[in-house]
Image (cartoon, grey):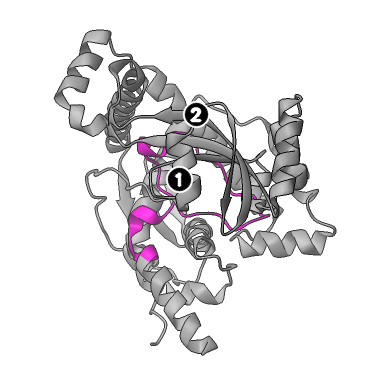
Amino acid sequence: MECAARDATVRTMKQLLLTAALLSGVAFQTAGAQTAPAPTTPAPATTAPAPTTPAAPATAAPAAPVSDPATPVGRVGKETLTLGDFDRAFRLAAARVVNAQGVPFEEAYLSEFASARPEFLKQFLRDRAVYQLARVNNRADAAALDQQLVDARSDFESDADFAEALNATGYADAADLRRELERQSVVGAYLQGIQKRFTFGDALVAGYYNLNRADFAQDAQACVKHILVPAQADAQAITRELAGGADFAKIAADRSQDPGSAAQGGDLGCFGPGEMVETFDRASFSGPVGAVQTVQSQFGWHVLTVTKRTEAGTLPLADAAPLIRDQLGKDAAQKYLDAQIARLGTEAFPAAVTVAPASQ
């Protein structure tokens, strides 16, 4: 059973990894600056598709053993990228996909993903092209990077525990993590700087809104915070405390039996009709906004407050305008970035990264 479960997990991860868009790409649709995942928890895969750009020409790699880390795998402008550079990036990309499935990364997974290496090379060269462009006018704060490493290490009792966590998220060591933090800091600043160059007037934003009004349709939503307790008497006591001025978030953190929201001061965020159990749903969408309510469900007694409620309909232009400006800025910045990468020029040597896939 364990072998079958592992095989199923590997198949799922391989399908994810074979989609190159899931691998670390730089795209403005992913909110600009990226952050290197901390080694305390598995890091999620990036899911935004990389924009279409002219394909890098595939040429024969210079003669060298494929296992040699110095083997050239591609060129970006005048910079030559080596197999060692590629393998570090591929390891991190694979780890992000594995971690997204709730599984710690292990070296053995790399052989399972061997067939994805030539496709990932395209994304790797694009990422390095962006990094090369970003380094022209951007530098990471060395002291800030050092502090990030200190903060990351402080979560662990020993260097061995820290090293184990680093390996489980795809980093060879702390220096590897620092390199990734530096790269993402520089690239993030560069991407944000590009997007800030583009501004859009009210007339253009209104025109976009009118042409794409259907995109701004929204369902009804309720934003709610609650405190879950086992008995009605507990709920009544908390209601009295809140009426006397007690802090909702503190009570939730100290006494709520819903661990998912207790740490957030009881905040459940916003949700649509039918997503909660019937009594809770009715209170959320029919009860008064801002008042304390008490309802029972199969989980216990809920002391809840609806902090905001939005009716179904079309998002007003005033609320949509910031979203539109952000999207237009990303689109314009992406076109600019694509042009800069094309001018820089990339060349790929896929034979240098191709290895035999693991036997099935």
What x and y, as percent, mark residue 204? 21, 14
Quadrant location of residue 195?
top left
Left or right position of 150 against 53? right
**Residue 115 drawn above or below residue 209:** below
In the image as oriented, which residue stretches furthest toward the left?
A: 211
| Image quadrant containing the C terminus | bottom left
Helix, strand or loop at disc 1? helix
Residue at the top extreme of this rendering: 202
Q: Earlier in the sequence, mark 2 or mark 1?
A: 1
Residue 82 picture location, percent across and down: 47, 57
* Dot 1 alpha-carbon crowd within 10 angstroms: few under 14, some 14 to 19, many 20 or more: some
In the image, is 107 to the left or to the right of 222? right
Is residue 280 highlighted in magenta? no
Q: Secondary structure at mark 2?
A: loop
Closer-to-camera residue (297/321): 297
Asked which quadrant contains residue 281, the reply is top left
The vertical placement of 244 against 305, above or below, is above
Q: Main secondary structure of the magenta part?
A: loop
Over which residues does the magenta segment extend? 16-45
Which numbered dot is residue 27?
Answer: none
Asked if residue 299 lies left or right of residue 157, the reply is left
The image position of residue 348, as x and y in percent, is 32, 55
Which mark is on residue 281? 1
- Foreground pick, 179 / 208: 208
- Residue at 63 percent across and 64 percent down: it is 168
Asked whether the residues under the numbered discs 2 and 1 touch, taking CB atoms below 8 Å apart as contact, a structural biologist would say no
Task: Identify the residue under disc 2.
Answer: 288
Residue 259 can be seen in this image: yes
| Residue 119 shown left or right of residue 170 in the figure | left
Q: Is residue 43 magenta?
A: yes
Task: Evaluate whether residue 147 shows in this view.
Answer: no
